[in-house]
Image (cartoon, helix red, strand yellow):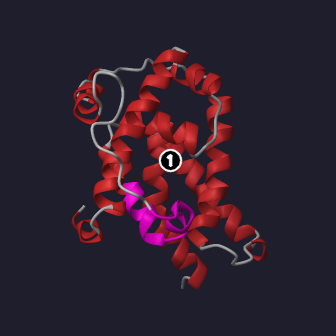
Amino acid sequence: MLTPITEQLESLRPVLLRFARLQLRNDAMADDVVQEALMAVLEKPDSYAGQSSLRTYVIGIMKHKIVDVLRHAGRNRQFDESDDASAEDLADTLFAADGHPLQRPRHWGNPDAALEQQDFFRVMELCLEKLPPKTARIFMMREWLELETEEICKELDISTSNAWVMLYRARLRLRECLDLHWFGDRVVQKKI
């Protein structure tokens, strides 16, 4: 019979696996990282003080495990931009030739308050899933795993300028998705 915390952890497994697979691009390594994070919680249940959700706590542990794997894996991958060809079209629809936005962004209210809301993370996750996998990966490596650009470039075997272009494209698409599904009409959120 499963304990309540074990049941909660088991319900988090699909979300954790999806994120770990996005970052590691290897099912076996992703499974290992998720298992290690879950075991860390089960081995020291008193370490979870309840100051955040259990999901946030486990993801924090897993984040460090993923960074360790990325730093020690020593593998190189070629970065294929073929699935990101439409990003330039997106930039053309959002910006004028002089680089200024065609429309002023909507006022997003208090971003710190929005980050505290559970629904925001659900919408953000769905927006990330809409990105091409490689674009989402580089964005998460930089913004969520907080890896330095040089580490990302080495891991993905890309140039610094390529990394910045990919980050720019990711931010454009995420901005558009969040503007539509979170900061804009809240009714649309449910339709993602």
Considering depth in this image, is 179 or 40 the residue closer to the camera? 179
Residue 67 higher or lower than 180, as above or below: above
The secondary element bearing badge 1 is classed as helix
Q: Which stretch did the figure color magenta?
A: 109-125
In percent of width and height, residue 109 lies at 46, 64
Label count reads 1
For residue 143, which quarter of the picture? top right
- Residue 113, given in percent of the width and then of the height, sits at 54, 68
Residue 174, how many percent across, how many down?
37, 46
- Which corner quadrant holds the N terminus? bottom right
Name the residue rendered at 56%, 54% in the picture: 34
Residue 189, picture quadrant: bottom left
Q: Which residue is drawn at 65% across and 40% down?
A: 67
Q: Is residue 136 left or right of residue 5?
A: left
Disc 1 target residue: 20
**Residue 158 in sight in this render:** no
